[in-house]
Image (spheres, rainbow, N blue to C red):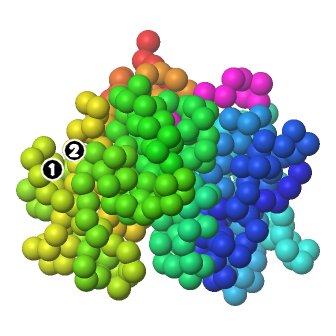
Amino acid sequence: MFFYGYLHELAGSRAGLNHSGHLRWSRFLRNPDVDIFCSPIAYFDRQPGGTGHFMVPVDSLAAHGKLWFNEDDTRTFVTPEDAGYGRCPTLWESQGVHQRNFAQIFPRRMGCWYMDLGNEGWVNHPSLWSNISKMREVWQKHANEPVRFAPEIAVVMDETSPLYTTSRSPVTPALVSHLRASLTRIGAPVGWWLLEDFLAGKVEPAKLYIFPNAFVLTAEQRARAKQVLADQGATAVWFYAPGFLDPEAGLADPAFIRDLTGIGVRLLDEPLQDLLSPIAEAPLCMGVSEPFGSKQEALKTQFAVAENEGLEPLARYATGDGPVGAAVTKQDGRPSVYIASLYAPSALLRNLARRAGVWIWCDSDDVVLGDARPDGGGWFLALSASAEGDKVIRMPRPTVVRDVFTGQVLGRGAEIRMDLRQGETRLLRLEDVR
């Protein structure tokens, strides 16, 4: 068992991912002598209302026959007020965070232990253990069932590309670490894989693939990526500099980006703030009212879209009259999306997912987890509220929705509504109406 592979988490660390020693996870995944990997819950965005993400592209583990363990060191309400790292001020928030973290591991049948630092009793309360006990009973009851986690959205991360950026570059932290918060709030379950496994055909087929940092690809790898996407008829979303660097050719060329994405780009002569204004009349920008981006100034390398026929512009630099910075086109009969920025909001990604045919369970930027699929695969769905309010969960067919713990019917039909506090989590069982 190893604590290793923290690609997502250490990308956002002060020292930078390049100094972490965690950039050879794929080598460990191929090693038959390693059985289990583990890490704490991601420290970034773990608070009540956060995503409770993994530190690694965790779904690559199953592709290699490995097991994952979460170390749930949640700072509960019994910790000191200065405990930091997403501390939960109340009992119900502590229970909600534990349930959200459980909803990450249960569909994948991963392991978990609960711990504190310094023997300070961070879970020393009967109501916390009662909540954990109920989750453990659910896990054990279904432990021997086949895993049905096959999300319609796949995020594909590269552990080679960070080696081609400087340790202090804002590119890797933004795309590998911070973008997780937006990707996890699209409104549908998401899987996380390594680029190497995608190219090797080890990733479960998806309707939407998102590539935050696929900067370094050979001509053979570009061709392989296009072939996988074409075979599945899947939509691809590419960020910033996809395929820009070809190590075999020894070149960095915008033409490689066009070859990979089907969208021509050019290098900007003068740097612009990394901020894109959505084009109001673009259907895919519905609900995206504010400019988006990392707001970084003077990136050393920046791209703009070369406008031509067959291109659907989505956003422009600056106040909306600058060059196009995001667009969609058709490549091999499927949508291909390019976003030059280091960030995209959940609303835009949700619109792209919906066009790709992904079933959107919830539109309100909350965290949706589980193995439920619109084709009837899986039965578990969880909603963790990123903000207080009335939540609407839409079903692909008439459905009976039950509380996982009690079996109580919470709703019946094509949609259910729940009024949730920020950080509150509901674990649901979906059953077809008979």
Residue at image coords 51%, 60% = 250
Magenta segment's dominant SS is loop
Residues at marks 1 and 2 touching, judged by CB atoms closer than 8 Å: yes
Label number found at residue 312: 1
Provide the secondary structure element on which disc 2 rests: strand
Picture quadrant of residue 252 = bottom left
Q: CA distance from mark 1 to mark 2?
A: 6 Å
The answer to whether residue 324 is visible is: yes
The magenta stretch spans residue 148: yes
Horizontal arrangement in the rendering, residue 17 relative to residue 270 (left or right):
right
Q: Is residue 432 above or below residue 417?
A: above
The magenta stretch spans residue 125: no
Residue at image coords 63%, 37% = 107
Q: Earlier in the sequence, mark 1 or mark 2?
A: 1
Which x, y percent locates residue 434?
Answer: 44, 12
Residue at image coords 66%, 56% = 56
Label number found at residue 329: 2
Horizontal arrangement in the rendering, residue 363 relative to residue 155 (left or right):
left
Instruction: Name the residue type under label 2.
Output: Thr
Which x, y percent locates residue 410?
Answer: 47, 36
Furthest residue to the front? 249
Provide the secondary structure element on which disc 1 rests: strand
Instruction: Name the residue type under label 1.
Output: Glu
Horizontal arrangement in the rendering, residue 370 relative to residue 279 (left or right):
right
Magenta stretch, residue numbers: 142-153
Give the camera-side residue of 189 and 320.
320
